Amino acid sequence: MDHAADAHRTDLMTITRHVLNEQSKHPESKGDFTILLSHIVLGCKFVCSAVNKAGLAKLIGLAGETNVQGEEQKKLDVLSNQVFVKALISSGRTCVLVSEEDEEATFVDPSLRGKYCVVFDPLDGSSNIDCGVSIGTIFGIYMVKDKDNVSLDDVLQPGKHMVAAGYCMYGSSCTLVLSTGNGVNGFTLDPSLGEFMLTHPDIKIPKRGKLYSVNEGNAKNWDTPTAKFVEKCKFPKDGSSPKSLRYIGSMVADVHRTLLYGGIFLYPADKQSPNGKLRVLYEVFPMSFLMEQAGGQAFTGEQRALDLVPTKIHQRSPVFLGSYDDVEEIKALYAAEEKKA
Ligand code: FDP
């Protein structure tokens, strides 16, 4: 009998137990983060269940409203946003919330305020909802500077100030990937237990990957470094094999694959969208935080993504993130372009 394997099966490491273990390394900690996380986990479980039965429950389709970016909201977007906002407020551990679905930030009533600010996209990749492709929730967590003097500045901080970030992917399985600034861990929802179990401890992204992930339909509007990089992926001149293209068009799914298999995910600037498409606070920052924590890099075309200081809550930025060496290559191409100018 393989006792080690048996022990592995019976010693159940849930996400709560994992975070409590981490908490015990900080004797000053009062468990506020664990409580906040349990409310985020509840939101993720609810959305997972809603996504799974979307077709059956007629949750697919438009809710008849448009969001801040002028996109049509889906029923699931609306539902997910409401669930997360209520779960986060009721945790009693939050003070400012920024959601992709809400034009303004939410300032939690002082009676329910805690020390954390949460920025999130409750249901990212919404154009994929109706065809059952993987979608996800993305979140980033900051600590408020002064609980009695809360302002938008508390969420307009560079990504490197985040204390935690993660995403939950609603795919063939429901996977929650989390970093509290001490590496990256992945947890898979066991539907029979209703618990996220540690399945991917200490995720490290391969130093170089064989995949690249980008919407090539925008190629005619790309800048020179992006065009050169993708050309190099397809027609390498150093004798290496071409990279394979993988693009789902759902950030959580594309980033999850990049994190596990290595490679690079690009959403560059182009002539139509000089700031790219993805939102800094609740897409670029959390994913960049996770990439760095897993040993990769994230770059905006100008600087380390986590150094960017946002000035607006729904600001966008180009982003190149993934394996260390692959991002290093795109950085070199931008540096060379800069020299020419
Ligand atoms: P979606 O528009 O479906 O919500 O920012 C949202 C996002 O999806 C990302 O999840 C995804 O990576 C990106 O947009 C896809 O954009 P393109 O369709 O322009 O490739």
Image (cartoon, grey):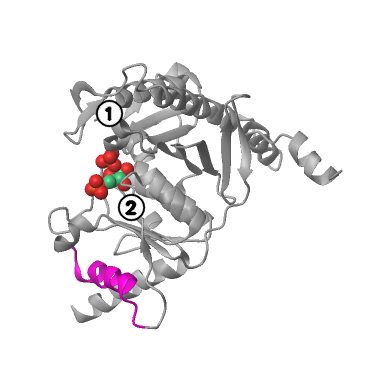
**Mark on residue 219?**
none
Mark 2 or 1, which is nearer the eye? 2
Q: Find residue 327 and report its image quarter.
A: bottom left
Q: Residue 64's x, y, as percent?
A: 18, 20
User: Is 315 in front, or is 177?
Assistant: 177
- Identify the residue at horizontal 46%, vertical 21% (top origin): 87
Please state which amino acid type lies under the numbered disc 1.
Asp
Sequence-earlier tag: 2 or 1: 1
Q: Residue 102's x, y, as percent?
A: 27, 28
Of the 4 image quadrants, the one containing the C terminus is: bottom left
User: How many numbered badges does the structure rendering display?
Assistant: 2
- Identify the residue at horizontal 23%, vertical 53% (top origin): 276
Quadrant location of ligand 1? top left
- Identify the residue at horizontal 48%, vertical 33% (top origin): 116
CB at disc 2 and ligand 1 closer than 8 Å: yes
Residue 210, relative to residue 21: is it above or below?
Answer: below
Alpha carbon distance from label 2 to label 1? 28 Å
Q: Residue 14's x, y, as percent?
A: 65, 33
**Mark on residue 102?**
1
Decide: few, some or many residues near mark 2? Use Cα within 10 Å; few <14, some 14-19, many ≥20. some
Q: Residue 318's x, y, as percent?
A: 27, 56
Q: Find residue 125 and report its image quarter.
A: top left
Q: Reply yes or no: does residue 297 show up in magenta.
A: no
Which residues lie in the magenta part?
222-237
Mark 2 lies on residue = 247
